[in-house]
Image (spheres, rainbow, N blue to C red):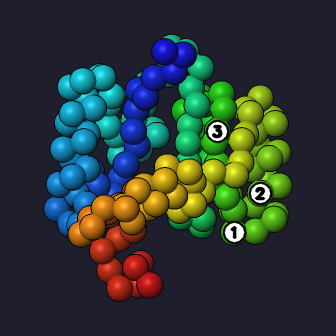
Amino acid sequence: PSASLDYVVEPWFLGGGATGPGGPEFKEWADESASKYGTAFETSMANLPDPKQPRCALISGRTADNPRLFTECIAAKSSTIFLEKPGAPTVAELQGMKDEAEAAGVGVLMGYNKNVCKYVRKTREFAETVPGSHVTFVSNNAYENTPESLG
């Protein structure tokens, strides 16, 4: 393979969301991935060691958190960042992120959207062909389990 999934940074399911909806399933997948592939799971980009090869980070968080996550990915020496759209709450923040990436020599790819990407669409289409099927998509956003955070 030309790439490997070495790290997953997931503060919600490795923290406050571990026992909530999706938490046990995430843990099962994390344990399997760690055992089978050596994937390490962390709660912060700051916990990652320096990369031994080019690091590509995929940011899939709340739009308001993306500028901070973007900066953390650059600090963790990512050479490429795959940023879920819209990327940031404001054009000014997007411009600041663009400037930050250019100054660090980091490539940025934008356009991925976890809610409409092909594997989600194909899963939904397949589920419609199976009577009584049930599919649950779990978002890995770091929401606090409070009414204010969950909106």
Q: Residue at x 60, y 65 (%)?
A: 63
- According to the image, label 1 marks what residue? 89
Question: In this figure, what is the number of numbered marks?
Answer: 3
19 up-or-down from 70: above or below: below
Q: Which numbered disc, 3 or 1, marks the residue that appears first in the sequence?
A: 3
The kind of residue tagged 3 is Ile
Secondary element under disc 1, as helix, strand or loop, is loop
Contact flag, marks 2 and 3 (Cβ < 8 Å): no
Q: Residue at x 74, y 33 (%)?
A: 107
- Residue type at numbered disc 2: Leu
Above/below status of 119 relative to 8: below
Q: Nearer the viewer, mark 2 or mark 3?
A: 3
Q: Residue 14 bears which disc, if any?
A: none
Label 1 to label 2: alpha-carbon separation: 8 Å
At x 35% / y 71%, what residue is drawn? 144
Sequence-wise first label, 2 or 3: 3
How far is the residue under mark 3 from the one under mark 1?
18 Å
Question: Can you see residue 70?
Answer: yes
Q: Position of residue 3 (x, y in %)?
A: 51, 21
SS at mark 3 in the image? strand
> Which residue matches tag 3?
81
Kindly indicate the quadrant of the structure image that contains residue 74. Answer: top right
Picture disc at residue 94: 2
